[in-house]
Image (cartoon, helix red, strand yellow):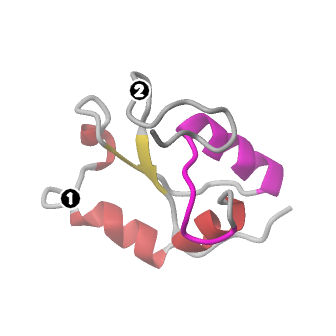
Amino acid sequence: MAKCYDCGLPYGESGWIEAIIPDMVWNDISPNKDQSGILCITCIARRLDQAGYKDIPVWFCGTERLRPILGYPGENKFSFDILRTWKPKIKE
């Protein structure tokens, strides 16, 4: 079973939240510095903070409770437009 690279939380466990962040940011913080590896939302947030990222758009998916916040494919194309067009602020 796949697990979070940092904390070991099994993928799909209760409490796992699916999240998508911009590719260029994911490539910078991912476990393998490419498209591979998985992190739970808590470890993503920790790595973003450690890397100095601020105001990163996040698309939550996979849980009914969070979908209405930003939408999901087929219902809210706006979410993906934000991820596609987002430009990073200069890291402090």
Question: What residue did someone put label 2 on?
Answer: 13
The answer to whether residue 66 is above or below residue 79 is: above
Question: What residue did someone put label 1 on?
Answer: 76
**Name of the residue lying farthest toward the top:** 14
- Where is residue 71? Give x, y as percent: 25, 50
Q: Quadrant of residue 74?
A: bottom left
Please state, as top left, top right, bottom left or bottom right, where the C terminus lies in the image: bottom right
Q: Residue at x 28, y 64 (%)?
A: 78
Magenta residues span 33-52
User: Of residues 85 and 24, which is closer to you in this image?
Assistant: 24
- Where is residue 35? Give x, y as percent: 54, 69
Left or right of residue 11, residue 29 in this image: right
Q: Amino acid at mark 2?
A: Glu
- The Cα–Cα distance between marks 1 and 2, rounded to whole angstroms, is 26 Å
The answer to whether residue 64 is above or below residue 18 is: above
**Name of the residue lying farthest toward the left:** 74
